[in-house]
Image (tube, rainbow, N blue to C red):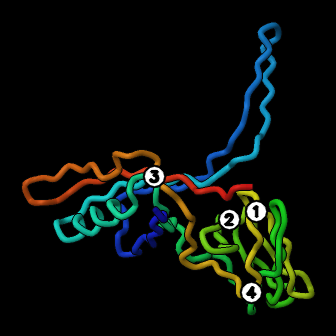
């Protein structure tokens, strides 16, 4: 059976949401000296946790959405509701030219413009792949910028207009109990959801 793919509606805004990059590290501690070494491994990915409290009509929509996903089988394009728009100026007509590793190449900014992107802004590099700008960015004299991002790029970037609004991450539910919800006598239901980014097979 083909996995369902759902776009999370922007009007189903959670009461609270955590949206973060879960790193993948390994830790070694010497039993003799207590010296600790920490190494980063590949596999850093986005994770989100949502709490929703909705009345009967929207609760039915959420029930249907979760049923369509069939637990962790299906995919959902999930936004970070704290970062629906970039805070940088985006001066000019910015274009995404390419990228590799943890760096994106952009052009089309107003030459020498400052603060075109700010730390914490999101950039969508292809469908379902979103990356966070990790430092404030100024354009150079040619309107170009080299932008450090996290997590690392895993898919080829889609060259074209820079996308910083309503960026989404391709995710799946972590467990089979996501549809569980408590409903009070006013038919208001509470949902607690956890999702994790779907990484491409490499």
Label of residue 24 in the image? none
Which mark is nearer the camera, 2 or 3?
3
Are the residues at dot 2 and dot 3 in contact (C-beta closer than 8 Å)?
no
Residue at 71% from the left image edge and 57% from the top image edge: 151
Are the residues at dot 1 and dot 2 in contact (C-beta closer than 8 Å)?
yes
Residue at 40% from the left image edge and 74% from the top image edge: 9
Label 1 environment density (alpha carbons within 10 Å; few <14, some 14–19, many ≥20): some
Which mark is nearer the camera, 2 or 4?
4
Q: Circle 1 is placed at which residue position?
A: 153
Label of residue 72 in the image? 3
Label of residue 160 in the image? 4
Indicate the position of residue 35 as horizontal and vertical percent values. 81, 18
Q: Which SS class for mark 4?
A: strand
Q: Distance between the residues labelled 1 and 4?
A: 16 Å
Tell which circle, 1 or 4, labels the residue nearer the N-terminal end.
1
Q: Distance between the residues labelled 3 and 4?
A: 32 Å
Q: Which SS class for mark 3?
A: helix
Indicate the position of residue 46 as horizontal and vertical percent values. 59, 55
Which mark is nearer the camera, 3 or 4?
3
Q: Distance between the residues labelled 1 and 3?
A: 23 Å
Tell which circle, 1 or 2, labels the residue nearer the N-terminal end.
2
Q: Circle 2 is placed at which residue position?
A: 131
Residue at 69% from the left image edge and 56% from the top image edge: 201
Q: Which SS class for mark 2?
A: strand
Which mark is nearer the camera, 1 or 3?
3
Q: Nearer the viewer, residue 125 or 20?
A: 125
Q: Which SS class for mark 1?
A: loop
Q: Distance between the residues labelled 1 and 2?
A: 8 Å
Residue 47 vs residue 53: left or right?
Answer: right
Q: Which of 158 and 32 is in front in this view?
A: 158
Tell which circle, 1 or 3, labels the residue nearer the N-terminal end.
3
Q: Is residue 134 above or below residue 180?
A: below
């Amino acid at each position: 059976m083909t996995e369902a793919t759902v776009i999370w509606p922007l009007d189903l805004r959670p009461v609270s949401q955590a949206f973060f990059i879960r790193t993948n590290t390994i830790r070694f501690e010497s039993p003799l000296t207590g010296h600790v070494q920490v190494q980063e491994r590949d596999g850093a990915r986005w994770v989100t946790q949502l709490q929703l409290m909705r009345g009967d009509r929207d609760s039915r929509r959420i029930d249907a959405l979760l049923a369509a996903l069939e637990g962790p089988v299906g995919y959902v394009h999930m936004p970070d509701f704290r970062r629906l728009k970039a805070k940088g100026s985006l001066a000019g007509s910015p274009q995404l030219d390419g990228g590799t590793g943890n760096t994106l190449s952009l052009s089309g900014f107003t030459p020498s413009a400052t603060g075109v992107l700010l730390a914490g802004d999101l950039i969508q590099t292809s469908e379902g792949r979103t990356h966070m700008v990790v430092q404030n960015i100024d354009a150079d004299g040619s309107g170009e910028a080299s932008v450090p991002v996290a997590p690392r790029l895993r898919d080829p970037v889609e060259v074209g207009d820079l996308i910083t609004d309503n960026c989404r991450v391709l995710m799946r539910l972590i467990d089979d109990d996501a549809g569980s919800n408590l409903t009070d006598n006013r038919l208001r239901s509470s949902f607690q959801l956890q999702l994790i980014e779907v990484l491409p097979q490499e």
